[in-house]
Amino acid sequence: AQSVTQPDIHITVSEGASLELRCNYSYGATPYLFWYVQSPGQGLQLLLKYFSGDTLVQGIKGFEAEFKRSQSSFNLRKPSVHWSDAAEYFCAVGAGTYKYIFGTGTRLKVLA
Amino acid sequence: EAGVAQSPRYKIIEKRQSVAFWCNPISGHATLYWYQQILGQGPKLLIQFQNNGVVDDSQLPKDRFSAERLKGVDSTLKIQPAKLEDSAVYLCASRWGTPGELFFGEGSRLTVL
């Protein structure tokens, strides 16, 4: 069975600083990988996804993520954080049998 | 394209009462999921449907939770009787193909007093 670990519960960065959110997964084959963002009182919005091919994927709002098979990781990055990026971020793993599992989330706080 | 619709957005009930949540997925999406998200946690899968059949309900507390997806379109999640620990946001999501991302509704927030 697949699993997802987001080791950082909270991260605080200053506006304009770079950001990296960590995600590690466990799955026997190549998984489908996702990053979602959730603002308070809202549903989850897809930032980016990886299915196959180029291991560096670009998403919306200037985010990117890199799939590293050797490290079982799919870390999310952004070169310059904006105050509006403050939210909760979830990494998710999808397996071929339709099952999609989410991590516990990382709450991002942005300092002005 | 219309997104995933959920209702009600908010519900407050007393413990031992019942509640039902409704979800209408994006048109044409065969796979539908219900997730439970407790405050401060990630979404936890309760049940997933492929058309009107259940694919996985291994984490659904079947003594109090039930879900159906008649005709393979919209779905209802019911809790009866509710407990305090059922206070959470219930998220519905749908997916078109494999591979494919999940599209989420805005959720139904349940408070059990």
Image (cartoon, coloured by chain):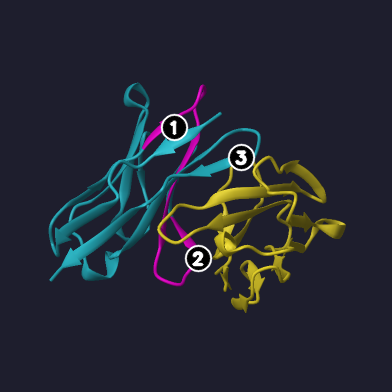
Residue at 37%, 58% in the rendered image = A60
Q: Nearer the viewer, mark 1 or mark 3?
A: 3
Residue A23, position in %: x, y? 34, 39
Q: Counting other residues with Cα less than 10 Å from the Cα at mark 3, is it few (<14), some (14-19), or many (20 or more)?
A: some
Chain at numbered mark 2: A
Quarter-of-image position of residue B109: bottom right
Crowd band around label 2 with a 10 angstrom C-alpha radius: few (<14), some (14–19), many (20+): many
Magenta residues?
Answer: A24-46
> In the picture, which quadrant includes the C terminus of chain A?
bottom left
Q: Residue furthest right?
A: B71
Q: Which mark is residue A43?
A: 2
* Closer to viewer: mark 2 or mark 1: 2
Looking at the rendered structure, the secondary structure element under dot 2 is loop
Kind of residue indicated by mark 1: Gly
When the figure is inspected, residue B2 is found, relative to residue A22, above or below; the finding is below
Q: Position of residue A42 (x, y in %)?
A: 47, 70
Q: Amino acid at mark 2?
A: Gly
- SS for callout 3: loop
Nearer the observer, A41 or A31: A41
Look at chain A in the picture and name its colour: cyan
Q: Are marks 1 and 3 in contact (CB under 8 Å)?
A: no
Which quarter of the image is occupied by the N terminus of chain A? top right
Q: Which of the two labelled residues, at mark 3 and mark 2, occupies the earlier sequence position?
A: 2
Dots 2 and 1 on the same chain: yes
Residue A99, numbered label: 3
Tell me the tag on residue B14: none
Chain B appears in which tint?
yellow
The residue that disc 1 covers is A53
List x then y, in percent, for residue B95.
64, 52
